[in-house]
Amino acid sequence: MTTQVLTAPAPGAADGGRRAFRDGARAMLPLLVAVAPFGLVIGVAAAESGAPQLAAWSTSWLIFAGSAQLAAISLLASGAPIVAVAGTVALINLRLALYGMTLAPHWRGTSRWWRALAAYLLVDPSFVVGSQSYASGRSPRAAHLHFLGGALLLWTAWLLVTAVGATAGAVVPAALDLEFVGPLYLISLVVPAARTPAIRLGAGTGAAVAIAAAALPLQVGPAAGMVAGLLVGLCLLRRAS
């Protein structure tokens, strides 16, 4: 089965595709203002964990989800078993399933490689750009390229700012409490831009629970928040359907 992204462009369509890609990158630029400080925090946390810089930086592209990355770094630094680290990362990233369910209707009929790439790149800021793109009335191909332009810029910027944070990590006091950064980032980025009650209330609930439970050991707070947010979002989606 072919996809709008892979089909040969008609005359003039290539220019339109490049324009859609560039527009997606431009749409992501304002969100990088919120993303960059969070990425720096992740890099600092990685540096303070004592892990080798290359290993710490690798979590940026292996996990590519800030809250889960921060939890993984903290757990690994505390000597937690790898099973606990993997389980916590999976729980925190459950909210991405809600994002995927929201955008999945727009990805039907696309190739497997496109769905795999889109799923890998789907995090909070790329969901914001993607949801706006698919709601804008663009053709499916242009909407895919718009999403891709924003998501690839985000991915590149994330690797850069986490690398900078890891390099400059010694400047930040080790006692600085960073657990609140992830939930607050989620509130400031996703909630104002979300177009559906399920996403707004789900993200808001998740962030509130994560902040309330921040003092719990083994990074249980963010995981509990993401599970709570996902359950609220799923309940609202079922009622709407």
Image (cartoon, grey):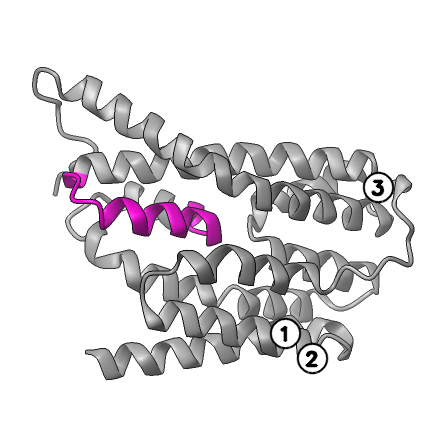
In the image, residue 162 sits, relative to residue 217, either above or below, namely above
In the image, residue 99 sits, relative to residue 159, either above or below, namely below
Of 105 and 30, nearer the camera is 30
Q: Which residue is rendered at x = 55% and y = 39% of the image?
A: 32
Q: Which residue is rendered at x = 33% and y = 40% of the image?
A: 147
Q: CA distance from mark 2 to mark 1?
A: 5 Å
- Quick one: SS at disc 2? loop
Residue 85, image x, y percentages: 67, 65
In the image, is residue 190 part of the stretch drawn in magenta? no
Q: Quadrant of residue 161?
A: top right
Residue 229, image x, y percentages: 48, 75
Q: Quadrant of residue 2?
A: top left
Crowding at dot 3, Cα within 10 Å, few <14 / some 14-19 / many 20+, comes out as: many
Q: How many marks?
A: 3
Amino acid type at mark 3: Gly
State the extent of the magenta-drawn residues as a range.
Answer: 120-140
Q: CA distance from mark 2 to mark 3?
A: 26 Å
Magenta segment main secondary structure:
helix
Amino acid type at mark 2: Ala
Q: Which residue is rendered at x = 59% and y = 64% of the image?
A: 89
Q: Mark 2 sits on what residue? A: 213
Q: Where does the N terminus fall, quadrant-wise?
A: top left
In the image, is residue 134 part of the stretch drawn in magenta? yes
Instruction: Report whether 211 appears left or right of 191.
Output: right
Q: Mark 3 sits on what residue? A: 169
Residue 142, image x, y percentages: 21, 34
Q: Mark 1 sits on what residue? A: 210
Q: Are marks 2 and 1 in contact (CB under 8 Å)?
A: yes
In the image, residue 7 sits, relative to residue 224, either above or below, namely above
Q: CA distance from mark 1 to mark 3?
A: 25 Å
Crowding at dot 1, Cα within 10 Å, few <14 / some 14-19 / many 20+, comes out as: many
Of 5 and 171, nearer the camera is 171
